[in-house]
């Protein structure tokens, strides 16, 4: 049976305590929240932190709050809490929809939104959803808090703009404009439930014309990627079936595709177009 390398365990009682430990141990430290990505990696010794900082008992990081300009979500908020939130179901149905297809119920009971976006697995659902919503990520370190736009936060495969001594504390979702719909769809790996190919879509429409579009592809590429070509093919266009088909056909443009036992490059390119059109259509029905 695989077991992790030796590490020191720290259960913290505050964000400041967690940051102090991150500052003390630097690259040797990892934050433990839900643990569904970190613990398996440690058991396989793909990750060997010398210090594990457990923030799972920090209730101050678990909340969903309406604010003047949108919704604030604490980084330690679980998928189950996101899925059950009436506020999110009303304003951002993409989030409950996306969390409902993550893993199984046990995973959703423990996994957290902050843990997912920091891990930034390209086949995970939450990074793509947060990116599509153009969220702002609030991080805290020894010098205080700073705000990072989602487009700047997700840097590369398993890489974010977070520094070793910083902790994600909050995700801010801007208030959606009028006549905006959102949706998330994926074709999942049957064993892991990770996306073989998925799409997060946020669409705004006025007088049957697309006024704004935020489209993100998950799973198919080596990194969570904004589908700018699809967005450009939608914005300013009259929305009809031909427009949707034309826009979705560009879903894999510019992507560095994954080719593995779960799907070839060619398969994933075809599926990207299918899943993009399906997701955009669902988002439009919610406008």
Image: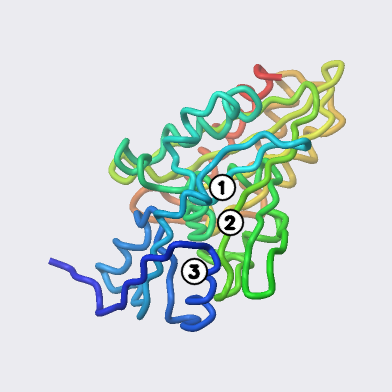
Q: Which residue is mark 1?
A: 74
- Relative horizontal placement of residue 81, taking residue 142 as reference (left or right): left
- Residue 78 image position (x, y, % from top left): 44, 43
Query: From the viewer's perspective, is residue 217 above or below residue 239?
Result: below
Question: Quick one: quadrant of the N terminus?
Answer: bottom left
User: Counting other residues with Cα less than 10 Å from the Cα at mark 3, is it few (<14), some (14-19), or many (20 or more)?
Assistant: many
Given contact means CB atoms under 8 Å apart, are the residues at marks 1 and 3 in contact?
no
- Residue 28 image position (x, y, % from top left): 43, 81
Residue 190 picture quarter: top left
Q: Residue at x 62, y 22 (%)?
A: 90
Q: Which residue is mark 2?
A: 169
Question: Quick one: quadrant of the C terminus?
Answer: top right
Query: From the viewer's perspective, is residue 205 above or below residue 112?
Result: above
Q: Nearer the viewer, residue 195 or 137?
A: 137
Q: Nearer the viewer, residue 36 or 220?
A: 36
Q: Secondary structure at mark 1?
A: strand
Q: Is residue 266 visible?
A: no
User: Counting other residues with Cα less than 10 Å from the Cα at mark 2, is it few (<14), some (14-19), or many (20 or more)?
Assistant: many
Q: What colour scheme governs how the chains and residues are painted in the rendered image of this protein?
A: rainbow
Q: Alpha-carbon distance for marks 2 and 3? A: 11 Å
- Relative horizontal placement of residue 270, taking residue 142 as reference (left or right): left
- Residue 7 image position (x, y, % from top left): 29, 78
Q: Nearer the viewer, mark 2 or mark 3?
A: 3
Q: Is residue 87 visible?
A: yes
- Relative horizontal placement of residue 271, taking residue 42 as reference (left or right): right
Q: Which residue is mark 3?
A: 18
Q: Residue at x 63, y 65 (%)?
A: 140
Mark 2 or mark 1: name the one nearer the start of the chain: 1
Mark 1 or mark 3: name the one nearer the start of the chain: 3
């Amino acid at each position: 049976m695989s077991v992790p390398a030796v590490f020191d365990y720290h259960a913290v009682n505050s964000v400041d305590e967690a940051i102090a430990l991150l500052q003390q141990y630097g690259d040797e430290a990892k934050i433990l929240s839900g643990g569904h990505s970190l613990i398996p990696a440690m058991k396989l010794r793909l990750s060997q932190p010398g210090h594990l900082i457990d923030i799972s008992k920090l209730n101050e990081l678990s909340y969903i709050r309406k604010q003047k300009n949108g919704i604030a979500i604490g980084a330690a908020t679980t998928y189950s809490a996101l899925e059950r939130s009436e506020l999110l179901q009303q304003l951002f149905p993409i989030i409950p929809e996306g969390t409902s297809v993550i893993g199984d119920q046990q995973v959703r009971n423990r996994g957290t939104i902050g843990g997912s976006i920091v891990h930034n697995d390209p086949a995970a659902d939450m990074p793509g959803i947060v990116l599509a919503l153009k969220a702002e990520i609030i991080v805290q370190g020894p010098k205080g808090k700073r705000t990072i736009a989602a487009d700047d936060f997700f840097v590369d495969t398993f890489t974010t703009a977070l520094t070793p001594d910083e902790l994600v504390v909050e995700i801010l979702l801007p208030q959606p404009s009028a006549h905006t719909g959102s949706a998330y769809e994926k074709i999942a790996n049957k064993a892991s439930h990770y996306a073989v190919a998925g799409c997060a879509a946020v669409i705004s429409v006025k007088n049957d014309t697309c006024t704004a579009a935020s489209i993100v592809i998950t799973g198919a590429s080596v990194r969570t990627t904004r589908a700018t070509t699809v967005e450009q093919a939608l914005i300013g266009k009259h929305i009809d079936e031909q427009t949707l088909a034309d826009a979705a056909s560009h879903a894999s443009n510019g992507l560095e595709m994954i080719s593995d036992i779960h799907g070839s490059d060619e398969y994933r390119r075809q599926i990207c177009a299918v899943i993009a059109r399906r997701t955009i259509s669902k988002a439009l029905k919610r406008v």
